[in-house]
Amino acid sequence: MSGEFDLIARIRERAGGPHAVAGPDGVVLGIGDDAAVLSLPPDRQLVVAMDTLNTGVHFPHDTAPADIGWKALAVNLSDLAAMGATPAWCTLSLSLPAGDRVWIDAFLDGFLGLAEAHRTRLVGGDTTRGPLSVCVTVHGLVAPGAALRRDGAQAGDDIWISGTPGDAAGALAQWKAGAGGDAALRARLDRPTPRTALGIALIGVAHAAIDVSDGLLADLQHLAGASGLAARIDLGALPVSPALRAAFGDDVRYALQATGGDDYELCFAAPSAARAAVIDAGRVSATPVTRIGQLLTGSGVSAWRGDVPWTPPSRGWDHFGRGEAD
Amino acid sequence: MSGEFDLIARIRERAGGPHAVAGPDGVVLGIGDDAAVLSLPPDRQLVVAMDTLNTGVHFPHDTAPADIGWKALAVNLSDLAAMGATPAWCTLSLSLPAGDRVWIDAFLDGFLGLAEAHRTRLVGGDTTRGPLSVCVTVHGLVAPGAALRRDGAQAGDDIWISGTPGDAAGALAQWKAGAGGDAALRARLDRPTPRTALGIALIGVAHAAIDVSDGLLADLQHLAGASGLAARIDLGALPVSPALRAAFGDDVRYALQATGGDDYELCFAAPSAARAAVIDAGRVSATPVTRIGQLLTGSGVSAWRGDVPWTPPSRGWDHFGRGEAD
């Protein structure tokens, strides 16, 4: 794009520039050549995830640039967390309608702020003229064979969730309604917390894990399906944030919590014998964890309200992208 | 996006699905989990490049889907080639206005056809609803310290170019003029050839390398600037394809060759003592290589027509993106 080199120079300057020799972070060559060169520690496998955020699909048009930067990296770090991987490096491909230094600096405040918090080095990428779109690839490290997968759950495993699901969907519902939304909920939509430390602490404890991007039931179906199992959750067991409880009645809240997306919490399966170990993993990672159901032989995912099976409302609490795109 | 899972399933099916154990290609876990898990051979560094192609910016709107797929991967493999890296894995983030199986199959024909030719496994990514945009991250491998960089050139080094620069810009000029363009030139614009084998063969031979995406003089400036040197090329030494020579007079052709982008040829610097080794690298990689100039002390890049310094025309032969975006 016109001004591409200035933009790249600015990103390079903010990201810390190239490093001539491999430091403890393994960056042999960072931004500024045709590609980055990275050195992995011995006995580590590479874990790679890639996700794109498009304006109007993955975030409301009025989202602040710093929040866009944060979220674009957060959803990718969340994928690494779901594998139990330790973040190492990322690349960023940014399509922008126009080069705008104020915008890019705000964007980088969010992006690099989260990167620093999770010790993730920005090592490359590109900038392009086009509709606003942010594509990120993250690279993490894991001991050979240790990655948490979706397909490792066993019948009888407990189902756990981190944090308080439904908050992001609650914020989105408020935004769609046009009312002044709750700031605590909106922060959960705009600045999801990648559960990096929890994912790492769950290695050797959990049998399977997934991050909740499309909605708890939908993503749990991915995990149960990959493991060849059925899953049952108890809506009454779902942890609830005070803000979500205050903003919505129970019926709507259950729908938000069970089917709303964008929370980026970890949903994971662990044997009942590991309950103390799961609670300990939550404690060492300072992440709330709650047991919400069980994996069973069979197929399909069901939610229960006490002894009554619950059916989600037909529409309206979908992932933002699908909701707006349809 | 609506239909995202079907689309991902189709890509996964075409790409060969996940692999349970690390094969010779190092894929421990491919498409279908939160992230891919990859196993590097011992004593190899990881080389990572990421580039996005947007419709109307990086390719004409009438480009065939198979050509879009090919080019999106080709421009990334070209970055690996410029580092001398051996391709290993890639991820693909595809934004599409609508899920269209015919389109995606044609796209994958181009993308996966090139991937197979360069032994690059598609291991992950995502699909999103949005304006047509293709973001690719490629991962290659290189022996520690062996990567070809931009900043390694030395004063007195020869400047070399692979292939016949200017063909892609010639095709673009014909497309902009609206005339029925030359098919051989258009193929060079739509289906650039990543110089993978040449890049690998140049390790230990070339001092520095870059791929020509923005134009020969512009990219040579990046190499010379990073190396703290000046560069001088002889326009009369530039290798010319028969199609380009037939289609344009000398003045226009020189402009296309010196400043037109999108060729994805390798421009590299090597000591004069290595001329036989460079020619040998071209021979073993079945890639034409031509000596076109020299690196000198100082700064700046100049092009000469015999003994007369040459100035590019003020506009009109720019990179497609800048040409259209301005």
Image (cartoon, coloured by chain):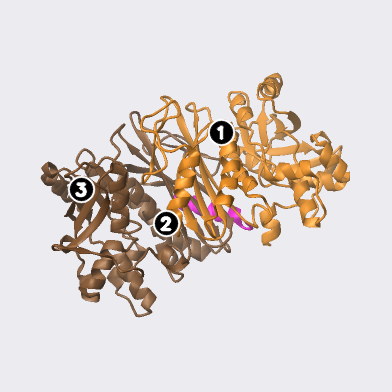
Chain colours: A brown, B orange
Q: Earlier in the sequence, mark 2 or mark 3?
A: 2
* Residue identifier under label 3: A295
* Cα distance in 3D space between marks 1 and 3: 39 Å
Residue B15, percent across and down? 49, 39
* Residue identifier under label 2: A72
Q: Nearer the viewer, residue B275 or A207?
A: A207
Q: Amino acid at mark 2?
A: Ala
Residue A197, percent across and down? 25, 47
Helix, strand or loop for disc 3: strand
In which quadrant will I find the C terminus of chain B?
bottom right
Which residue is located at x 45 percent, y 31 percent?
B45
Q: Is residue A295 above or below residue B132?
A: above
Residue A187, percent across and down? 32, 67
Question: Which quadrant of the view contains residue A255?
Answer: bottom left
Circle 2 residues within 10 Å: few <14, some 14–19, many ≥20? many
Q: Is residue B272 visible?
A: yes
Residues drawn in magenta: A1-16
Circle 3 residues within 10 Å: few <14, some 14–19, many ≥20? many
Q: Are marks 1 and 3 on the same chain?
A: no
Q: Are marks 2 and 3 on the same chain?
A: yes
Residue A278, percent across and down? 16, 46
* Residue identifier under label 1: B116
